[in-house]
Amino acid sequence: MNIVGLVLRDLTRRPWRSGFTIAGVAAGACVYSLIIGSTENFVQKFHDLSSVLGDSLVVQRAGSLTPLASVLPNDLTERLRSLPGVAGVSRVGLGRCRVSDSPSFLVLGLDPLEPLAVRLPMARGRRLAAIGHGVLLGERAAARLGVGPGSELELGGQKLTVGGIFRTGHSLLDAGAAMDLAEAQRVFDLPGTVTLMLVDLESGIDPAQACAEVSRQFPSVEVTTLGDFMDTIATIRFVEQFARLLALLAVGIAALGAANVLSLSVQERTREIAVLRAIGWQRQRIAGLVLCEGLCVGLAGGVVAAPISLVALGLLARFGPGSSIGLLSGLLPPGVALEATAVSAAAAVLGAGFPVARALRITPSAALRAG
């Protein structure tokens, strides 16, 4: 009988035990898919901001770990506008406050006459320039809070009138609010400063060259394209690295369980392996038999985990943390499902190392002792 036939026979010999082993590996692969899939969804939300904010350059204070930690002086705006190839500059004052059940409600402070505020797409109500002492709400935030134009909303300890509802199509932005920059500077204690500036370039200007020129003239700031900006945020990089570490740990624990079961299987098949050695099977073929069994368990676990992960991720996006602001899309990236299956298979094969060593110590004479 060939290796594949022997592996399938052994896996079906004790279906309950094989099923539990595959379920354990599937649980590890499922955790891997959930952690990595959620992280990729989270990071992609920030990268998708470019579809709303355009191809602007992002300017923040050099060394800022997060945009909220950046502080830029207001007078930098005119100096940036005077650079060749700059079509416009938008100042952004970022703030967070508690609103209803959201402890971290995002508020954008915008100058009503600057490009970003002018092109903010409105669903209903008035634009920022026309509301005075008021606030614009994103469509998701308005629906969640049950308010509309003309309603009163307490924001940062002040009661403001909702002047309009904007719809960007981006869940994070549409779950927040926008207000006059001067008002935001008072509410979030940003006197004469902003957190970010978005620089729009004239047609035909190379963004890389523009970034280099801004960096040369203003060494105290960091400037990148919006797409690259997300990769510079230390918090996001930390989340990605920590998530991958946790995911690998989960798969590793599942692989240890599979290794224990494989070791028990080798012990129970001592006589069979001894007979195979007696009829001429070489050590590498015996090793291949055990490794193939581990590979089958790992692959089966990865395949079983894929649909479970998809359902679990959908539930997490709908009811989990951050669901009110659409932090997760609920979709499992195909690459993550394949990656989880490959990692599970590799981990199971690595975990088969001890059972392989045990099998290789079995000699033909063991068949007589086992008998």
Image (spheres, helix red, strand yellow):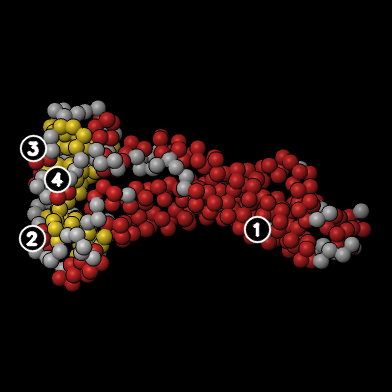
Nearer the N terminus, badge 2 or badge 4?
Answer: 2
Kind of element beneath mark 4: helix
Nearer the N terminus, badge 3 or badge 1?
Answer: 3
Circles 2, 1 touching at the beta carbon (< 8 Å)? no
Circles 2, 3 touching at the beta carbon (< 8 Å)? no
- Dot in front, 2 or 1: 2
Residue lying at 22% horizontally and 59% vertically, measured from the top left: 57
Nearer the N terminus, badge 4 or badge 1?
Answer: 4
Q: Nearer the viewer, residue 274 or 49?
A: 49
User: Based on the displayed image, in which of its 4 quarters is residue 100 positioned?
Assistant: top left
Residue lying at 26% horizontally and 60% vertically, measured from the top left: 225
Residue lying at 78% horizontally and 61% vertically, measured from the top left: 286
10 Å crowding of disc 4: few (<14), some (14-19), many (20+): some
Q: Which residue is mark 3?
A: 130
Q: Is residue 62 above or below residue 17?
A: below
Q: Give coordinates of residue 112: x percent, y percent.
A: 10, 45
Nearer the N terminus, badge 4 or badge 3?
Answer: 4
- Looking at the image, residue 357 sits to the left or right of residue 346; the answer is right
For the residues marked 3 and 1, what is the alpha-carbon distance in whole angstroms?
Answer: 65 Å
10 Å crowding of disc 3: few (<14), some (14-19), many (20+): few
For the residues marked 4 and 3, what is the alpha-carbon distance in whole angstroms?
Answer: 11 Å
For the residues marked 4 and 1, what is the alpha-carbon distance in whole angstroms?
Answer: 58 Å
Give the amino acid at mark 3.
Answer: Ala
Residue lying at 45% horizontally and 38% vertically, measured from the top left: 314
Nearer the N terminus, badge 2 or badge 1?
Answer: 2
Q: Which residue is mark 4?
A: 118
For the residues marked 2 and 1, what is the alpha-carbon distance in whole angstroms?
Answer: 61 Å
